[in-house]
Amino acid sequence: MGWFGKSDERDSDTIWNSYVQAGDDLYQAKCELAEAEQRYADAERELFGIDLLPVLRKALRKYSLSALGLLGEIGEEQPELVRALIPELYACSLGIGKPDILARGVLRTLSRSGSLHAELVPLVTATLRDTERTTDVFAMRGLAFLLEDVNDPALLGRWRRTVLVSADEDVREIAEDYPEDEFPEPAPPQQL
């Protein structure tokens, strides 16, 4: 019988050695993690000593999760950097994968400090004129998520009008998730 009244057919030395080895492995992993955390902190310190804009612009063209993660961490403290990267972040946001979700999160953070409407209008307009994009269910769903995330009902209304006449039936069905009674199109501005 063992300590807790259980019998074990394995040899007690084997069990002890397994426990010791697991403890050694855990200690080694913790040491490696501490070293990796230090290397990361050193690399981050160096990174903040350079001009991040061109580096991040280039990285975002490749949908870099590292760049998106960094912008997610520093976006609130450096909104001017994020604002300069709106076109790249917008391009990264048109889908439903992890990079798209992260890019929308960065833009959502930026939208808390002010409207993104003026910056998004030309980007959304170009997307809604692109027949390849307007027949891509993932791009159109990603765009709807973005416009909802940044709370832009005017652009969401334009998106809805475009989606309803898409050549792709699956794209048209997305509009069902945004019924007109819940997402009304804003009234056009009155002219004086």
Image: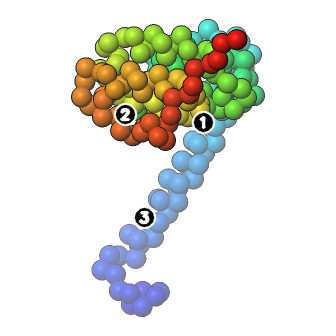
Q: Secondary structure at mark 3?
A: helix
Compare residues 14 and 43 and report the one nearer the observer. Answer: 43
Residue of label 3:
18
Q: Which residue is mark 1?
A: 36
Apparent side of residue 50 relative to residue 145 in the rendered image (left or right)? right
Q: Nearer the viewer, residue 94 or 44?
A: 94
Cα distance between the residues tagged 2 and 1:
46 Å
Label 1: how many Cα within 10 Å (few below 14, some 14–19, many 20+): few
Instruction: Please name whichever residue, 176 or 15, is drawn nearer the observer in this view of the structure.
Output: 176
Relative side of 73 to 12, left or right: right
Distance Cα–Cα, label 2 vs label 3: 58 Å
At x 48% / y 26%, what residue is drawn?
Answer: 157
- Choose mark 2 or mark 1, whichever is in front: 2
Instruction: Tell me which numbered mark, 2 or 3, is placed earlier along the sequence.
Output: 3
Which label's residue is closer to the chain start, 1 or 3? 3
Residue at image position (73%, 29%) is 113
